[in-house]
Image (cartoon, rainbow, N blue to C red):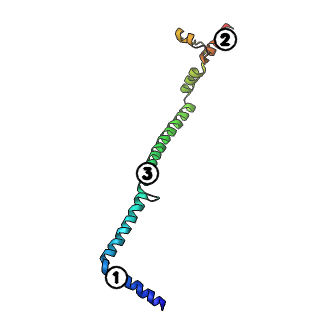
Amino acid sequence: MQYLKEKRFSQDLSDRIKRYIGVDSVLLLFSLLFFLYFVYIIFFGEKNIFKLIQKERYRSQLKAQITQLERDNHNLQEKIRYLKNDRFFIEKKAREDLGLVKEGEEIYVIVDGKERKNKKEERWIDRVIQKYQEFRLR
């Protein structure tokens, strides 16, 4: 019995609301609330549009870094292959970096006097010159 009274009361209340507001207004109100909820999710939700844009920018930056690193890797692989196979380049690097010479060649090193006075530390070329002079004196 009481259930019927409550049901009748809720129906009466909904009928009064419908008559007072109108069915179109209720539908408009619900659609407006749904639209506001949708806008809230898009702009302020956990996966909002601003975060999406930020992640897309970060993704494009990472892609650019990846392509740059792939280019660098390719260049380094070419250089490694070149260093392993080219005798002239190997000889050139040995002469420049290690100070090696062929038989009958002499090394000429031009040293700036002002710069030499300022630097008191011994450079690798100085050690090479010293070894070369010791070798020539024998």
Q: Is residue 4 above or below residue 97?
A: below
Marking on residue 56 = 3
> Mark 3 to mark 2: distance in Å?
65 Å
- Which x, y percent locates residue 80? 55, 34
In the structure shown, which secondary structural element does the residue marked by tag 1 occupy? helix
- Camera-near label (1 vs 2) is 1
Q: Decide if residue 31 is in sight here.
A: yes
At label 3, the amino acid type is: Glu
Mark closest to the chain's N terminus, 3 or 1: 1
At label 1, the amino acid type is: Arg
Q: Which residue is mark 2?
A: 135
Locate residue 1 relative to residue 137 in the image: left or right.
Answer: left
Q: Quadrant of residue 132?
A: top right
Say which residue appears at 31% left-offset and 79% top-offset: 20
Mark closest to the chain's N terminus, 1 or 2: 1
Q: Decide if residue 108 is in sight here.
A: no
Within-10-Å neighbours for mark 1: few <14, some 14–19, many 20+: few
Say which residue appears at 41% left-offset and 56% top-offset: 49
Q: Which residue is mark 1?
A: 16
Say which residue appears at 56% left-offset and 24% top-offset: 93
Q: Is the C terminus in the top left, top right, bottom left or bottom right quadrant?
A: top right
Marking on residue 94 = none
Q: Quadrant of residue 121?
A: top right
Within-10-Å neighbours for mark 3: few <14, some 14–19, many 20+: few
> Mark 3 to mark 1: distance in Å?
52 Å
- Camera-near label (3 vs 2) is 3
Question: Cβ–Cβ below 8 Å for labels 3 and 2?
Answer: no
Within-10-Å neighbours for mark 2: few <14, some 14–19, many 20+: few
- Camera-near label (3 vs 1) is 1
- Which x, y percent locates residue 16? 34, 82
- Which x, y percent locates residue 134? 67, 10
